Image: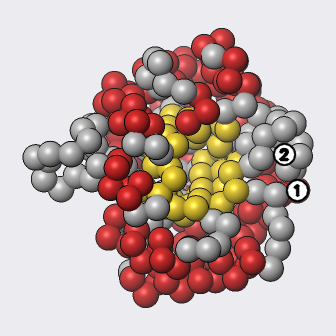
Amino acid sequence: MSTPGIRPLVAGNWKMNGSRDMARKLVADLVARAAGSELPVDLLVCPPFPYLSVVADALSGSSLSLGGQDCHTAAAGAHTGDVAAAMLRDLGAGAVILGHSERRADHGESSGLVAAKAKAAVAAGLTALVCVGETEAQRNAGDAEKIVENQIVESIPSGIGFADIVVAYEPVWAIGTGRTPTVADVAAMHRHIRALLTARDPLGAVVRILYGGSVKPGNAAELMAVPEVNGALVGGASLKAEDFWGIAEGAAKSAS
Ligand code: PGA
């Protein structure tokens, strides 16, 4: 089992994919599967902003929860094109992905900005799902643990309740590439992250640490069984109900 006492979370990050019709069908399929089973795994669906409402309706009454893919640092105001954490909460979201490597790369998001967003998210009643991960060059240079450590320290704001945090370790070079680190490398990084979190707060012992990057039904059970891996952040494979469900089943195998 990955960490005794921690229930796995499998989160689907749809990124900028889908349509209204696809969102309805995909979620209806997931809801039907969830209704017919008692998987000991929490499931989270994070669609693009325009489909949050459609997905919220489709998830209603089910055991799955809704999440956003980003939020602004401010509670409201003159920020054209941005979305406040309270708006996500208003639509029924329970969580928001923050600091994904695509946002760090596409929008130049710094860890400091991610920390400010995490503070705003938690203040609005959301769980902040904070992403960290090294590039391939950083890993090849032997700097992976140091890079991730700095991202953890700088992206998780001081004073935040650790009960409201989820960490996702996503090596940038494993995202969307079909490549994954070795089980030993995942184990080493997750152990390192756990040590960093517990050194900061006793509740760090129960923060969920997800692995993300090319998780598929075929490798989920093996990855989810790694010590201190408490679920998955899934990109491409979250766009097909069968694949997302297959990953949830993989995670269930190592659930306590
Ligand atoms: P992937 O993406 O599963 O398509 O590799 C993971 C992520 O970016 O969260």
Instruction: Please give the residue where the numbered disc 1 appears in the rendered image.
Output: 253
| Residue 238 % position (x, y) | 58, 67
Residue shown at 56%/74% (left/top)?
60
Residue farthest top in this picture: 199
State left or right for residue 252 relative to residue 242: right
Q: In this view of the protein, which residue sits in the foreground, 104 or 30?
A: 30
**Ligand 1 within 8 angstroms of badge 1 C-beta:** no
Q: Is residue 178 visible?
A: no
The quarter of the displayed image where residue 119 is located:
top left
Q: Residues within 10 Å of mark 1 (few under 14, many from 20)?
A: some
The quarter of the displayed image where residue 218 is located:
bottom right
Instruction: Please give the residue where the numbered disc 2 appears in the rendered image.
Output: 225
Q: Residues within 10 Å of mark 2 (few under 14, many from 20)?
A: many
Residue shown at 46%/17% (left/top)?
158
* Inter-mark Cα distance, 2 to 1: 8 Å
| Residue 111 % position (x, y) | 38, 27
Ligand 1 occupies quarter: bottom right
Quarter that holds the N terminus = top right
The reply to whether callout 2 and callout 1 are in contact (CB within 8 Å) is: yes
Mark 1 is on which residue type? Lys
Q: Is residue 168 visible?
A: yes
Disc marking residue 84? none
The quarter of the displayed image where residue 110 is located:
top left
Mark 2 is on which residue type? Ala
SS for dot 2: loop
| Residue 205 % position (x, y) | 73, 25
SS for dot 1: helix
